[in-house]
Image (cartoon, helix red, strand yellow):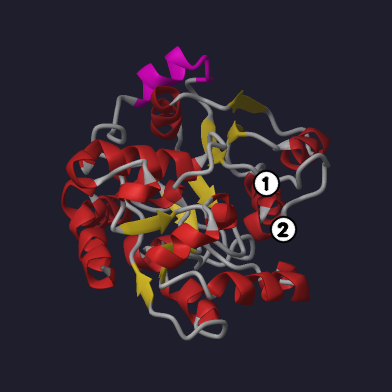
Amino acid sequence: MAPNEDWICDRISSEWSKYNYDITTDKVEDADVIWLLAGWCWNHIPQSILKSKKSILTIHHIVPEKFTQQKHQEFVFRDQFIDAYHVPNSKTASLVKQLTKKPIYIAGYWYDPDMWFDEPKDECREILNLPIDKFIVGSFQRDSEGGTRNPKLEKGPDLFCDYLEKIKDSVDLHVLLGGWRREYVIDRLSHSNIKYTFIEKASIEQLRMMYNACDLYVVGSRFEGGPQAILEASSTNTPIISRDVGIASDVLDPYCIIDIPKQIWFPEQTSTGQNYKNVQKYNIMNYKNTYIEIFERIK
């Protein structure tokens, strides 16, 4: 079940249906196992159905500072209707284990090789109207709190900007932003006189070119489920650095995992090549079987 928010959960749901149409249904009444991919939408399904069906709920990540007493109470109430939990990494699993006695299954996200592959950098820059001769650093996410210009701290926009401000005098810098709710980052870039291009809500085709146009992609998050950017950058052979969050240690070469913004590092081609090799495990054509095995265990 996806939330219809035009964001990552909807894409995951669409890709799952694309490659597993023969075992997937949109009708909860016909399902053997209900996969609540967007756990915050669990109450869109009648409790009577949840009680009569097996269900697994995905928890992408937990931000301890935002996990209030009210959220804890909501978790406990919902837990009575859930048979098992899916989390994308061991860090999230350790937090969920403190909240439930239900089974917890760890399975990272996948990537679709039909969508994510490398393309010529100069051609992508030309199509996207980006400067050919600049050092382009990318960040494609949403990281301002909804309806405000305040940073969504778990996504680390402040750390990302700190990093950019540290390297701006050592490279001919241009920043490429994607996603939406980037107000905080845009304000910081403008204040620091850092040139940028913002492509809001890019199509998949545009987003693939955006990765391929980058000299470096930066994940400065404090908490993550994935992010998908780690898979997408790795599968497009885009150099990437990340804090040790989410699935970073499962996919990235150790030299690509650094303490942003304290450390300054531009990964070498050998590390980028290793990322590409590592990410092949998460090709949906094969990795979907990991999820199917989980669902079979719940039935």
53 relative to 51 in the view: left or right:
left
Q: Do the residues labelled 2 and 1 touch (CB within 8 Å)?
A: no
The number of callouts visible is 2
Residue 91 is tagged as none
51 relative to 282 in the view: left or right:
right
268 relative to 49 in the view: left or right:
left
Which secondary structure lies at badge 2?
Answer: helix
Position of residue 293 measured from the top left corner of the image (x, y, whole percent): 20, 65
In this orientation, does residue 200 appear? yes
Q: What stretch is highlighted in magenta?
A: 121-131
Residue annotated with mark 2: 153
Position of residue 97 measured from the top left corner of the image (x, y, whole percent): 50, 83
Residue annotated with mark 1: 143
- The residue lying at 64 percent from left, 55 percent from top is 155
Position of residue 240 measured from the top left corner of the image (x, y, whole percent): 43, 50
In this orientation, does residue 88 appear? no
Of the pair 261 and 275, the residue shown nearer to us? 275
- The residue lying at 71 percent from left, 53 percent from top is 162
Q: Which amino acid does label 2 sit on?
A: Leu
> Upstream in the sequence, badge 2 or badge 1?
1
